[in-house]
Image: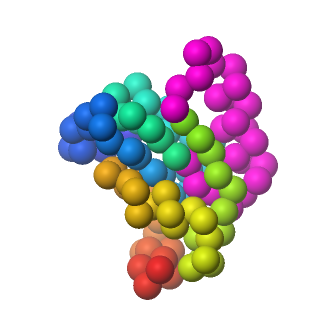
Amino acid sequence: ARKIFDIADPTPDDKHVELGSGDGRVNFFAIEAGVKQSIGIDVDEDIVQVANDRLNRIHPKPNLEFVVADLMSPLSPAWDHVKEATILTMYFAREGLEKIRPL
């Protein structure tokens, strides 16, 4: 995550979105790196709950949100977050990237 944000050189105006955010590690790092907002999107409700549990232990709350969504659906509201992102991160195998590319 450090290398990603060294390259991205985030500013306090950036909105970060992580596709396939898992437990939110990259999102938490994005907040530490100085982005204005970070959104994590994952299809797995259980892992999103793990991220939210971690978020709920932080006070004051950072501008961080986790969303359960299926990115394979072109109508998913998660795509609205992607359109607003100034920094977009993901870790997908080639097959996954080829599936979401048309969306």
Direction right: furthest residue: 46
Corner quadrant of residue 12: top left
Q: Is residue 98 visible?
A: no
Q: Is residue 32 left or right of residue 96?
A: left
| Between 66 and 43, the one nearer to me in the picture | 66
Taking the view exactly as shown, the residue that stands out farthest to the top is: 59
Residue drawn at (57%, 62%), measured in percent from left and top? 78
Pinpoint residue 77: horizontal percent, then vertical percent.
Answer: 60, 65
Task: Confirm whether the magenta stretch covers residue 42.
Answer: yes
- Across and down, in percent, residue 34 comes to 34, 28
In this rendering, position of residue 94 left or right of residue 58: left
Q: Please tell me whether residue 34 belongs to the stretch shown in magenta.
A: no
Residue 71: percent from left, percent from top: 58, 70
* Observer-nearest of 92 and 80: 80
> In the visual, does 42 lie left or right of 49?
left
- Report the span colored magenta: 40-63
Q: Is residue 99 above or below residue 77?
A: below
In x, y percent, where is residue 18? 48, 52
Residue extending farthest bottom = 102
Residue at 62%, 45% in the rendered image: 66
**Left or right: where 103 falls relative to 3:** right
